[in-house]
């Protein structure tokens, strides 16, 4: 079995041959973050997928992210090194149930979190990420909004807009399991630390936080904050990036349970195999792709105005 150095050399060689880039989400394993050409949150990575002039994108993240890249950039080959790296929350929203909900509320706009399948995006008016959910919802003329699939993000949006939000009942298992008692414990261990939470967390947890931010929001915030210590209330993979980019600051996990197993499936060998054997190619049927792209494009157009 080749060692890590050999695998990294192989990846570098194959990337050149195939005119490929590696995009990685902030929750990926540290060694995957370290070999990525671009690291980011869902919003930034979607934009990169559009802007980059390459033939192949190796997406180190979960299925919906690679699928969004394939929707936005049909001229590029999008590879997901582990086919079964999926987001359980994205799989909580089913297109047939969404159609029924839309029939119950024909006057509502439908906003889908980027953590959805392309099929669900195709049924929605506009997409959003954790970085822009409030702005996206505020931009709509309808006062009634179906928000799918994260009930916690829906609640956060409802509290920060004057819209009537009809939430889906889904949630991120990794964020939803973080409890106020975890935050309390972390605060008593690190009383000087600022608490930064992701809006996929429950309301009670958000209420105990000093800042509510997407993963890139946290990256940007800590680099300019005067604080030296932070309790990070999101998936633990982000700690790798925060520690690397801010060697003189301290970052604490809110608990030891904040791991998304799907975000940890891709390893260096899987990336090398992916580039060598061009697997797994993520494609979306053209009729769905066109409709899903409309939802993503509308979001990206708003983002550029912010
Ligand atoms: P962001 O990186 O966009 O904040 O998303 C978090 C997430 O859970 C992606 O799966
Ligand atoms: Fe999905 Fe949560 Fe994992 Fe993100 S952290 S991929 S929302 S399960």
Image: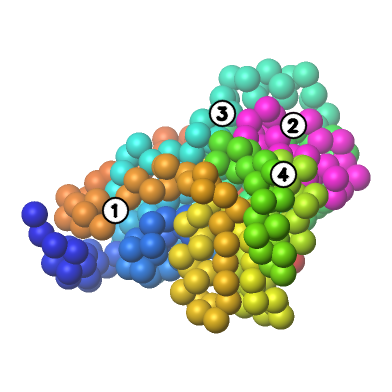
Picture coordinates of residue 208, whole percent (x, y): 78, 52
Q: Residue at x 83, y 42 (%)?
A: 158
Residue at the disc numbered 2: 167
Residue nearest the viewer, comparing 190 with 211? 190
Q: Are marks 3 and 1 in contact (CB under 8 Å)?
A: no
Are dots 4 and 3 in contact, CB under 8 Å? no
Q: How far is the residue under mark 4 from the one under mark 1?
A: 33 Å
Q: Which element carries disc 1, helix, strand or loop?
A: loop
Residues in magenta, as a range: 148-171
SS at circle 2? strand
Residue 294 position within the rendered picture, expressed as x and y whole percent measured from the top left? 60, 46
> What whole-number distance in Å separates the C-alpha atoms at marks 3 and 1?
26 Å
Using a 10 Å C-alpha cutoff, classify the residue at mark 3 as few (fewer than 14 neighbours), some (14 to 19) or many (20 or more): some
Label 3 sits on residue: 92
| 12 relative to 110 in the view: left or right | left
In the figure, 193 relative to 109: above or below?
A: below
Nearest to viewer (mark 2 / mark 4): 4
Measure the alpha-carbon separation of dots 2 and 3.
13 Å
> What color scheme is it?
rainbow
Pointer 1 residue: 267
Q: Image height check: is 18 above or below 156?
A: below
């Amino acid at each position: 079995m080749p060692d890590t150095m050999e695998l990294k050399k192989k990846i570098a060689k194959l990337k050149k041959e195939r005119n490929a880039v590696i995009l990685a989400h902030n929750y990926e394993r540290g060694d995957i973050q370290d070999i990525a050409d671009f690291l980011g949150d869902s919003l930034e990575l979607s934009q990169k997928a559009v802007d980059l002039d390459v033939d192949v994108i190796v997406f180190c993240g979960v299925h919906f992210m690679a699928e969004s890249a394939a929707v936005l950039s049909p001229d590029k080959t999008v590879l997901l090194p582990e086919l079964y790296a999926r987001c359980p929350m994205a799989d909580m929203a089913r297109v047939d149930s969404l159609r029924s909900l839309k029939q119950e509320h024909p006057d509502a706009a439908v906003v889908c979190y980027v953590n959805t399948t392309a099929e669900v995006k195709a049924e929605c008016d506009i997409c959003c990420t954790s970085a822009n959910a409030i702005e996206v919802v505020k931009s709509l003329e309808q006062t009634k909004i179906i928000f799918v699939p994260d009930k916690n993000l829906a609640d956060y949006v409802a509290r920060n807009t004057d819209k009537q939000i009809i939430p889906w009942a889904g949630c991120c298992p990794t964020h939803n399991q973080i409890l106020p008692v975890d935050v309390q414990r972390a605060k008593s261990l690190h009383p000087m630390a600022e608490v930064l939470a992701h809006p996929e967390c429950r309301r009670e947890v958000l209420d105990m936080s000093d800042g509510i931010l997407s993963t890139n929001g946290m990256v940007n915030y800590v680099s300019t904050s005067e604080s030296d210590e932070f309790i990070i209330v999101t998936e633990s993979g982000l700690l790798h990036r925060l520690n690397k980019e801010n060697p003189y600051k301290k970052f604490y996990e809110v608990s030891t349970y904040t791991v998304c197993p799907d975000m940890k499936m891709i390893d260096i060998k899987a990336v090398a195999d992916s580039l060598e054997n061009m697997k797994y190619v993520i494609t979306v049927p053209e009729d769905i792709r066109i409709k899903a792209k409309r939802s993503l494009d509308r979001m990206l157009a708003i983002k550029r105005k912010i």
